[in-house]
Amino acid sequence: MIRNLNGHPIIIGLTIHPLERRSATRPERIRPRPCLAWERMFVSAVTEAPQWLESLNPEQCAAATHAGGPLLVLAGAGTGKTTTLCARVAWLASEGVVPERIMLLTFTRRAAREMLQRTRALIQMPVGSGAVLGGTFHSVAHRFVRLHASALGLAPGFGVLDAGDAADVIDMIREEHGHAQSKARFPKKSTLLDLYSRTVNAQRPLADVVTESFPWCEQHLETMAALFKAYTARKRKLGVLDLDDLLVYWRALATDELIGPQMQDAFDHVLIDEYQDVNGLQVEIVRALRRERRDLTVVGDDFQAIYGWRSASPEHILQFPTHFPEASVITLEHNYRSTQPILATANALAAQASRAFPKHLRCELKAGSQPELIFCRDESAQAAEVCDRVLEARERGMQLREQAVLSRTSHDTDLLELELTRRRIPFVKYGGLRYLEAAHVKDLIALLKLADNQGDEISWFRVLQLLEGVGPATARRVLDLLVTAPQTDRLASWPTAREPLPAHARGPADAVISALRDTRDERLAGPRVERLRDALAPLIEARYPDCAARLHDLEQLVAAAREHSGDLRHFVGELVLDPPQSSADLAGPPHRDEDYLVLSTIHSAKGLEWQAVHVLALYDGNFPACMSAGSKESVDEERRLLYVAMTRARRQLHLYVPVRYYHRPNGTDDAHGYGKPSRFLTEQVQQLCDVIRSSDQPSHLGPPTPTARLITVSVDGLFD
DNA sequence: TGGTCGCCAATTTTT
DNA sequence: TTGGCGACCA
């Protein structure tokens, strides 16, 4: 059993993958440990220099020891942002601030864990004492809302819906309202949830959000407004909160005239990482928490804001000095990560931005090779090129885990995954399909939720449809019979409720029901999950052809439950907020001796770094995505996304432009199917990438590379 | 005829 | 994996 830094077991991830069927020798996915340059700095700082503050540069030191009042730390990529924040927590603690009175909000739980661990190492707090309250906005919100559940009119063990569950609830209402069959196409569940979530997180009227981001839905505005009202009512009725509700409820607590001041007084210091990615709702929470007490530290880089599609906006960090007029601002500009040529290229890209805090990253590593811009014949040539370079670098002594392949979408690496498998190069991938999104995992979770709450219609709906010959209509009929039963024991009405089932499905259904019944008195999550998994297994086997791999995934969940000390409700709740196999949870080196290449989406690579970085598929329409071509803001965000990708590299940076692509029929105005190099690769950047290699070989596939170069010249026009 | 099931196409990024 | 469409079953 592998554990994370908190000692919790980690599930090693999916064994199912869309490409799996074609590649039998695919390596098991494991989580790599991120490369931490600052970690090394600190190890020496702690062991060799007791006054660890001396290892910081003057700006970092000023930030770490800032006394009193709001502080904005603008930390460019690779400038020791995490180092500084850790040092600040350590400094506060060494100054006598009680750790429990420090709140540390980070973007991922991994970041929180790492920081707390580093901090402990710095000031030698005994393990267990450093109870800094740390985590994501959502997980901290969960804690507060649970604490004040009754004040909020919630049952003590309210459930938390993940995004998939929320979409299912919306879909159910959508059907009840009769939108499923209406002739005018109605937005589907994921669009609706997206729209709802954006509206809530941005704290702006629905009409505005629709007009701005979903103009094609405008005709349905009133209907959708009614649907969303029904959605919130339904959540109340079901006694559940979705992820957005956690924030909404936290804000309600923070602004409450009784609880708000208490909550504010409970924390001497609030520190927030990645402030460029907060949304309007989160800002309101922060302002409520620091209305009177003003000790607040926020750290971020407006040029690395890449979550606009989740209602985050770099405007919030830009406006921090307005919200907190007495704020001090410290800018970190010494980059310790990348070589000068890489930094110069990234700076050239940043210079194209329309709005940003001025920053001039200075580089400590002068020497280094130029970034490479590589034109490839097509996406499979791109895959081959990447493999060649990766192996070449390994020959020269660079471990695979020191290299990473980053892409705009997780799907960009499909061909590469096949090629890596063919060449037997081990790799791990994160981003992409996540553990909790796999159908069979959702099946088991639905059953677990039923064990906890027999009134959970969504879960009933899902579980019933696992039975052979049972679809939405039959499931609905059974459900109606169950729901009419008294709240306390819905299972009591099972003998009647099972009537609508086809005869051959009744036996298997009974087996599941008795498992639910048998485990009712079991307190610990482990035995319950195991028993329920056993009951579900036959249905999984009957339903999915590749059941062995899927059952293996479920076994991981059982193993995790066995290690869990709490009850089932707790276990499921934590699973939703801290899902395994998410990029947020890359903890603990699983096998020190293993070496593997890292594949990741750029979003998931945030905060990480590697010696060599390969960025795939930089052609117009993909990166920047055509979905983002609509507004200046979203194109700016695409640019920042590329900036984030480029600044992950320490020594080598490779950018790939496949010239011809196959998977995007009628996607653009280009009927010939040639990719145009990304609109971000203007001449300015290209000149800095002085090694331009073409990799075309004689081929039946056709067009010679010069066509691509011609297109390159015309890229600038796309900015207009 | 209502309902299930099989087949095909398409899919941005995630707490 | 989801959604849409058409075939087939009670």
Image: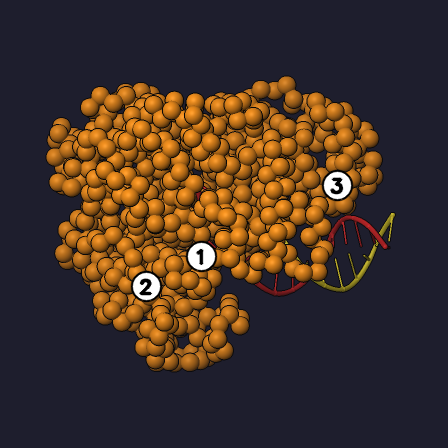
Chain colours: A orange, B red, C yellow
**Which chain letter goes with mark 3?**
A
Is residue A96 placed above or below A325 in the rendered structure?
Answer: above
At which x and y percent is residue A84?
22, 38
At which x and y percent is residue C3?
64, 55
Residue drawn where x is 37% and y is 52% of the image = A306
Measured in 3D between alpha carbons, the distance from the residue under mark 3 to the one under mark 2, in whole angstroms, is 52 Å
Q: Is residue B15 left or right of residue C7?
A: left
Q: Earlier in the sequence, mark 2 or mark 1?
A: 1
Return the residue at label 1.
Answer: A409
Measured in 3D between alpha carbons, the distance from the residue under mark 3 to the one under mark 1, in whole angstroms, is 37 Å
Label ID, residue A655: 2
Q: In front: mark 3 or mark 1?
A: 3
Which quadrant of the rendered structure holds the N terminus of chain A? top left
At which x and y percent is residue A83?
23, 38
Secondary structure of residue under mark 2: strand
Which quadrant of the rendered structure holds the C terminus of chain A? bottom left
Residue drawn where x is 22% and y is 54% of the image = A358
Residue drawn where x is 65% and y is 59% of the image = A185
Label ID, residue A162: none
Q: Earlier in the sequence, mark 3 or mark 2?
A: 3
Q: Is residue A189 left or right of residue A573?
A: right
Return the residue at label 3.
Answer: A476
Residue drawn where x is 36% and y is 35% of the image = A286
Secondary structure of residue under mark 1: loop
Identify residue type, mark 3.
Answer: Arg
Is residue A112 placed above or below A686 in the rendered structure?
Answer: above
Q: Is residue A78 left or right of residue A142?
A: left
Measured in 3D between alpha carbons, the distance from the residue under mark 2 to the one under mark 1, in whole angstroms, is 15 Å
From the viewer's side, name the closer residue of A642 and A59. Answer: A59
Residue at mark 2 shares a chain with residue at mark 1: yes
When asked about the image quadrant of residue A114, the answer is top left
